[in-house]
Image (cartoon, helix red, strand yellow):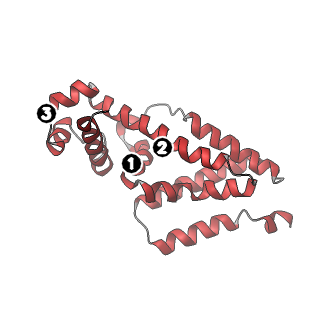
């Protein structure tokens, strides 16, 4: 990828995260990136092509995180690492993940059927297996509950809560899944 393409993608990412996909024209992206709108069209065809390139980047980035969770030996460690994942994502690349999590509210994406990525499905499978190994009666339902909780946490993280809130929330969620509680 050329420097210009990277600049265009970074600018589009920033503006889509700040203002939304629907309300960000390619002319604004071109102006802020200091390139012609024609260059955007030459490299990415249209605004949807820009978003497709950004979404492809999310696959690569998520793959790295999922692989690190899969590599953990202990089932409880896998669950705890999954709980920590939204905080890790937002702390490393805030704008990028803010955009990813906000797409469900943007007009163009609301009506489309959601197809989870292969890495998301792999993570769900790994966490389901971890719950199964720990003896949970309904591991699939535990994963569903955990996904809903982490979606809510991700929404909170978009609002930039305090470090204390984040630590308290992570601690509370992890406390729900402790070996001592599982044995009782």
Q: In screen coordinates, is 69 left or right of 178? A: left
Above or below 152: residue 120: above
- The residue beneath circle 3 is 36
Quarter of the rendering containing residue 20: top left
Query: How far apart in space, not on screen, are marks 1 and 3 (Cα)?
Result: 23 Å
- The residue beneath circle 1 is 96
Residue 127, percent across and down? 69, 47
Residue depicted at x 51% and y 59%: 87
Q: Earlier in the sequence, mark 2 or mark 3?
A: 3
* Rendered-image quadrant of the N terminus: top left
Q: Earlier in the sequence, mark 2 or mark 1?
A: 2
Say which element carries label 1.
helix
Give the camera-side residue of 29 and 112: 29
Above or below 62: residue 158: below
Q: Residue furthest bottom?
A: 164
Residue 122, percent across and down? 64, 38
Mark 1 vs 3: CB contact within 8 A: no
Residue 61, which numbered label?
2
Mark 2 vs 1: CB contact within 8 A: yes
């Amino acid at each position: 990828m050329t420097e210009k393409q990277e600049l265009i993608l970074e600018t589009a990412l920033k503006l889509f995260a700040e203002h939304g996909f629907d309300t960000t024209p390619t002319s604004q992206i071109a102006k802020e990136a200091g390139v012609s709108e024609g260059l955007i069209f030459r490299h990415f065809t249209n605004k949807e092509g820009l978003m497709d390139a950004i979404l492809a980047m999310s696959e690569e980035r998520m793959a790295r995180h999922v692989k690190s969770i899969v590599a953990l030996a202990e089932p409880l460690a896998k669950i705890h690492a999954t709980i920590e994942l939204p905080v890790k994502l937002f702390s490393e690349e805030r704008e990028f993940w803010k955009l990813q999590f906000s797409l469900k509210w943007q007009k163009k994406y609301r009506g489309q059927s959601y197809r989870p990525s292969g890495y998301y499905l792999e993570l769900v499978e790994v966490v389901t297996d971890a719950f199964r190994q720990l003896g949970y009666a309904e591991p699939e339902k535990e994963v569903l509950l955990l996904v809903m909780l982490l979606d809510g946490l991700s929404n909170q993280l978009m609002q930039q809560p305090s470090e204390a809130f984040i630590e308290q929330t992570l601690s509370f969620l992890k406390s729900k899944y402790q070996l001592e509680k599982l044995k009782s």
